[in-house]
Image (spheres, grey):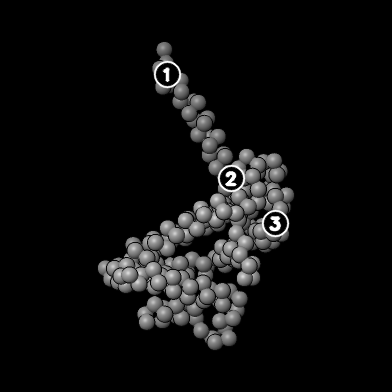
Amino acid sequence: MRSGKEEACPHEAKAKRAEHLRDARRTLIVKAARDVFAREGLDGASMRSIARSAGCTTGAISPYFHGKEELYSAVLREALEQLHLAVGAAIDTSNSEDPRTRASAGVLAFYEFYKGRPDDLTLGLYLSNGLKPVGLGCELDVVLNHQLGETLSLIESCAERAYGFSAQEWAAGAIAQCMGILIMEHTGRLMLWQIDGADLLKKFLQD
């Protein structure tokens, strides 16, 4: 006679397979959405075009996401998760006990992440349309801003030991430099001066 635990094993395996299938479908939908948003923007994209890119129907998306705003948020959250890991890893592997060096390593990782992923930079600037704030709605904006804040806090916590009460101001200035340089690089404007963006940022961090 088999025990209850043994009888439950096939059901557990089936449940795990179903969970893996759901995760795979969700990942596929988010990837397709990222491609569509990068190509068409939030306003130009539609659930139909995302479904077509994912090779499914709009009805197959609805169990996971209730609209394109939720999908856009999922795309941004995934990028922010990877940004957080990249910044944290750069700080941890900076091989220095100097807090300024560690903070600078985090800033440079932030820059390198978006330099290598221009689509994520474009998608991440959803908060502005020209100079007009847009956003995804209060709840989604709060989640995304909190997630970005967690990454920035990694840099600020290192900077606190070097700059004390000025750490937040230093971090804000460093990220502002990052974003300005990235935008000028990706739009080709920095080429007017024949200056490398990374070198420009490093000079700011060393001053």
Q: Which residue is mark 1?
A: 4
178 up-or-down from 36: above or below: below
Q: Quadrant of residue 163?
A: bottom left
Give the camera-side residue of 52 and 58.
58
Amino acid, disc 1: Gly
Residue closest to the far bottom:
193
Which dot, 2 or 1, sits closer to the camera? 2
Dot 3: what SS? loop
The residue that appears at 56% across and 44% down in the rendered structure is 24
The residue that appears at 33% across and 70% down in the rendered structure is 165
Residue closest to the far left:
97
Q: Quadrant of residue 110?
A: bottom left
Q: Which residue is mark 3?
A: 45
Q: Quadrant of the N terminus?
A: top left
Q: Quadrant of the C terminus?
A: bottom left
Give the camera-side residue of 199 and 123.
123
In x, y percent, where is residue 123? 59, 62
The residue that appears at 42% across and 80% down in the rendered structure is 204
Dot 1: what SS? helix
Amino acid, disc 3: Ala
Amino acid, disc 2: Arg
| Separation of marks 3 and 2 at Cα, in angstroms | 18 Å
Q: Which residue is mark 2?
A: 26
Q: Determine crowd level at label 3: few under 14, some 14-19, many 20+ residues with C-alpha closer than 10 A.
A: some
Q: Earlier in the sequence, mark 2 or mark 1?
A: 1
| Separation of marks 3 and 1 at Cα, in angstroms | 50 Å
| Separation of marks 2 and 1 at Cα, in angstroms | 33 Å
In x, y percent, where is residue 16? 50, 34
Dot 2: what SS? helix
Q: Is residue 88 left or right of residue 187?
A: left
Q: Determine crowd level at label 1: few under 14, some 14-19, many 20+ residues with C-alpha closer than 10 A.
A: few
